[in-house]
């Protein structure tokens, strides 16, 4: 008979590892020391230290997006979980598979209301699809197996297991086996027929692809449907991960900004949503508009997020007589293969990035205002994956890059990072240095919350002196080179495209992390 693990913490670790959950991102405290101690007995679990919980949760998101596996986090009590909620919110919007392990007070101690006592369940439920408090070291294995199963449901979800410290130090119970992930839901024949009938009709149509339809094969299928029906094919606005560049078929996305999004759909009468929700603006304004579509636009859903949309697209191609393999002849973006020179502009930056991007790189995009046009400019770059801010909670870029680099250690990661949002999780640089990750971070240093100037104007307001001061990050100005150096990352600044080109070309060939501060002038005229 197999001997039970020595402690509840070891039972938990063995259950995670046997289910293939072998990478954990954590910022532990006293309640988690028995978990950390158990790592010596379970060497298959890799635990990556972060200096802040929001770095740990963002890194778990990036790891799961790139690996396709379930990631784990280790967080210290309810307040530690609360510190990581912003990037768990982004992960929930991306439908990322994460198991949160949240330490808590010993059960005989918590009712005395010690300093870190809190309603951890209430914090967890704001971002979790499933939450449970483990009550015994003898059943913690079963609890962990249930959490893993829930995190894998529907292609990805967030499960949170709250672990009192006495459950960790108590006598270990049996290791539990988590069931395999259930198959994705099949899209019904009625939905496929409705989409076919719509696309074969006389209406001007568009197809919007959700995250599960943004792999290489789904893009080929969707483009074949578009070529056959005349429908415009787009990705949704907030992308978990898309495979693009090289010989892959290009895909545009629904614009974030209201005016170009409205213009894009002005003549569209019907939209097929392929595993996607209806397009919605990040914020409503006084104009009362919530989405880009024209009044009276018809929507048809070809599957929900998490469904088997690849099979649905395949069947839709068959019903339409579309030929996916024939899309090889479809035109692709004819972009520049030379770097840009002169002043730094979004278009110039996109041209240089497309020219210098290594084959099979991973781009993490939290470029916000300056970086918004870079997605289109890099359609013709070498093959790469593109990860994006999904839930609008800024501070995800550098943490996502940690997880992506650990999930794909032989691939270069390039982070496009707005300066204001980068400050939310700047501690991520330390973990990049500690783990010696091949991450190149490019900070768009305009020293302002530029997006708020843009949003103020969209609302029909003129920024005054108070707005200028509240949105400015220039008094005092931050020095990203010194910030990076302080966390153990080499860095340099660039004030022209020539300087950027030289720094980026060098950084992409060296081992370990490097940060480039891209010095941008004011752009508020």
Image (spheres, rainbow, N blue to C red):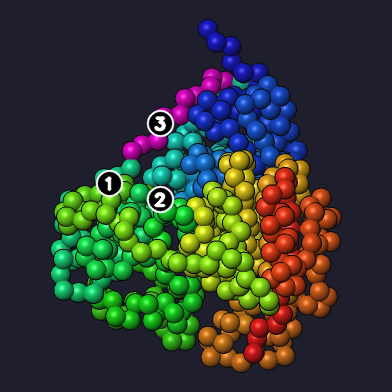
Residue range in magenta is 173-183
> Where's residue 484, x and y in %?
79, 57
Relative depth, front residue between 201 and 502? 502
Residue at horizontal 76%, vertical 43%?
A: 434
Q: Secondary structure at mark 1?
A: helix
Q: Residues within 10 Å of mark 1 (few under 14, many from 20)?
A: some
Q: CA distance from mark 3 to mark 2?
A: 23 Å
Specify whether residue 181 is painted magenta. yes
The answer to whether residue 259 is above or below residue 331 is below
Relative depth, front residue between 240 and 10? 240
Q: CA distance from mark 2 to mark 1?
A: 13 Å
Q: CA distance from mark 3 to mark 1?
A: 20 Å
Question: Which image quarter holds the C terminus?
Answer: bottom right
| Residue 311, numbered circle | 1
* Residue underneath mark 3: 180
Residue at horizontal 23%, vertical 74%?
A: 204
Name the magenta segment's main secondary structure. loop
* Residue underneath mark 2: 215
């Amino acid at each position: 008979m197999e001997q039970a693990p020595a402690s509840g913490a070891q039972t938990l670790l063995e259950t995670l590892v046997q289910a293939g959950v072998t990478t954990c991102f954590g910022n532990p405290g006293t309640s988690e020391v028995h978990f950390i101690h158990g790592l010596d007995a379970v060497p298959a679990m890799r635990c990556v230290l972060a200096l802040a919980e929001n770095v740990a949760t963002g890194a778990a998101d990036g790891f799961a997006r790139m690996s396709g596996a379930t990631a784990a986090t280790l967080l210290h009590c309810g307040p530690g979980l609360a510190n990581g909620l912003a990037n768990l919110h982004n992960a929930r919007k991306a439908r990322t598979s994460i198991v949160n392990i949240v330490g808590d007070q010993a059960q005989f101690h918590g009712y005395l209301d010690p300093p870190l006592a809190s309603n951890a369940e209430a914090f967890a439920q704001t971002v979790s699809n499933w939450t449970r408090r483990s009550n015994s070291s003898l059943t913690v294995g079963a609890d962990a197996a249930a959490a893993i199963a829930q995190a894998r449901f529907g292609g990805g979800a967030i499960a949170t297991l709250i672990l009192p410290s006495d459950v960790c130090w108590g006598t270990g119970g049996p290791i539990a086996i988590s069931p395999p992930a259930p198959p994705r839901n099949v899209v019904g024949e009625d939905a496929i027929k409705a989409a076919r009938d719509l696309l074969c009709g006389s209406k001007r149509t568009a197809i919007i692809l959700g995250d599960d339809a943004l792999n290489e094969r789904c893009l080929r299928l969707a483009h074949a449907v578009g070529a056959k029906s005349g429908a415009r094919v787009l990705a949704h606005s907030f992308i978990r991960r898309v495979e693009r560049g090289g010989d892959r078929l290009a895909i545009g996305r629904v614009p974030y900004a209201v005016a170009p999004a409205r213009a894009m759909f002005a003549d569209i009468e019907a939209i097929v949503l392929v595993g996607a929700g209806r397009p919605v603006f990040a914020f409503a304004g006084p104009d009362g508009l919530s989405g880009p579509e024209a009044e009276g636009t018809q929507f048809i859903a070809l599957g929900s997020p998490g469904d088997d949309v690849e099979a649905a697209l395949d069947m839709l191609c068959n019903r339409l007589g579309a030929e996916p393999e024939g899309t090889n002849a479809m035109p692709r973006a004819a972009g520049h293969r030379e770097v840009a020179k002169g002043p730094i502009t979004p278009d110039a930056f996109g041209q240089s990035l497309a020219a210098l991007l290594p084959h099979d790189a991973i781009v993490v995009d939290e470029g916000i205002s300056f970086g918004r046009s870079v997605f289109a400019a890099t359609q013709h770059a070498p093959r790469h994956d593109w990860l994006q801010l999904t839930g609008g909670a800024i501070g995800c870029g550098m943490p996502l890059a940690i997880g992506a680099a650990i999930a794909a250690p032989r691939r270069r990661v390039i982070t496009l990072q707005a300066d204001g949002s980068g400050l939310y999780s700047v501690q991520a640089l330390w973990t990049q240095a500690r783990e010696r990750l091949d991450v190149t971070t490019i900070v768009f240093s305009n020293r302002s919350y530029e997006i708020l100037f843009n949003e103020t104007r969209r609302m029909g307001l003129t920024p005054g002196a108070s707005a200028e001061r509240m949105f400015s990050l220039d008094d005092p100005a931050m020095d990203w080179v010194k910030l990076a150096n302080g966390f153990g990352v080499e860095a340099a600044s660039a004030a022209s495209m020539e300087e950027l080109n030289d720094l980026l070309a060098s950084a992409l060939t060296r081992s370990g992390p490097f940060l480039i501060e891209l010095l941008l002038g004011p752009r508020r005229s």
